Amino acid sequence: MALYVMGAHRDSSEDGGEEAPAVDFVDAEVLEVLELARGDSVRSALEEVTDLGVKYSVPDWFAERLEQQLGRDVAEGFLRVSNEPGPTVLRLNPLRTSREQLIQDLSEHKYVGLASKDSPLCVVLEKNGQARRASLQSLQLWLDGHFEVQAEGSQLACLALRPEPGMTVGDFCAGRGGKALTLAVQLQSDPERPSQIFAYDVDEAALKQIPASAKRSGVEQSVIVDPFKKHLERAAKERGVGGVDGVDGVDGVDGVDG
């Protein structure tokens, strides 16, 4: 969530001569609530801040370098956009539907979806069709595995791997399985060449959510969940290492996503 660091104070005369406390950290959603409660004074105070690092909550060195390279106006425009909430982005499941059909089905629930020009799996919801993840996940379309909420960058990363049917793929930072499921769906194109996706992560609570998602997406036979922590601990013990911070390379798999 984007943070706004505000170093502005209200005029001391407003509070009987006592200086009002500064607003230190305000995220975009809280800013909207404060504006409703206090008019536009919060945003006005923010606009008066001239230090780009303070105004947009980025390191001073980054703001200075950006301003040197792009100029003040372009740098501030970039930082302002970077602090805005991103669009709600969906990844369609081609095993269940097509992009055209998903957009049409979403419109029946008053969501306005647009096809992305970059990822063929991506549907971007217009701002007037924005919805919280919880609302989207109450739709029968989601329950039937027609789509998942997933950033387009993650979709493109999976497409760039170009996995082929028959491969064994390891996702070594699987989390809740977003990329693992994307890859599993891609690898379903040839039933005669079954593939397996091994989903690893040290966060076992996150991994426990994968089987239900895989079943909903129709790839439960392809995704194998393994906490991985026990493997790291065993390997560390065998090598006399007190702990393991990461994995540099893995033998025996055709692709690594993480």
Image: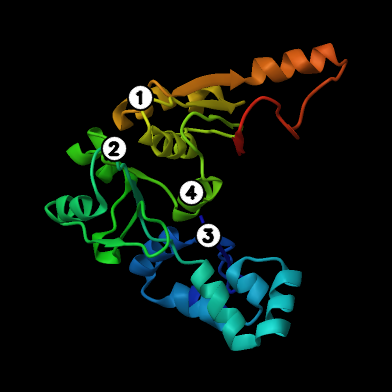
Q: Is label 3 or label 4 in front?
A: 4
Secondary structure under tag 2 reads loop
Q: Tag 2 or tag 1, which sits nearer the N-term?
A: 2
Identify the residue at image location x=46%, y=75%.
Answer: 43
The percent coordinates of residue 153 (x first, y second) are: 50, 54
Identify the residue at image location x=24%, y=48%.
Answer: 98
Q: Is residue 147 left or right of residue 23?
A: left
Q: Which residue is mark 2?
A: 95
What amino acid type should be assigned to the residue bearing mark 3? Ala
What amino acid type should be assigned to the residue bearing mark 2? Leu
Between 182 and 235, which is closer to the camera in this rendering? 182
Secondary structure under tag 4 reads helix
Q: Which residue is mark 4?
A: 159
Q: Is label 1 or label 2 in front?
A: 2
Secondary structure under tag 1 reads helix
Q: Is label 3 or label 1 in front?
A: 1
Q: Tag 4 or tag 2, which sits nearer the N-term?
A: 2
Between 94 and 58, which is closer to the camera in this rendering? 94
Q: CA distance from mark 2 to mark 3?
A: 35 Å
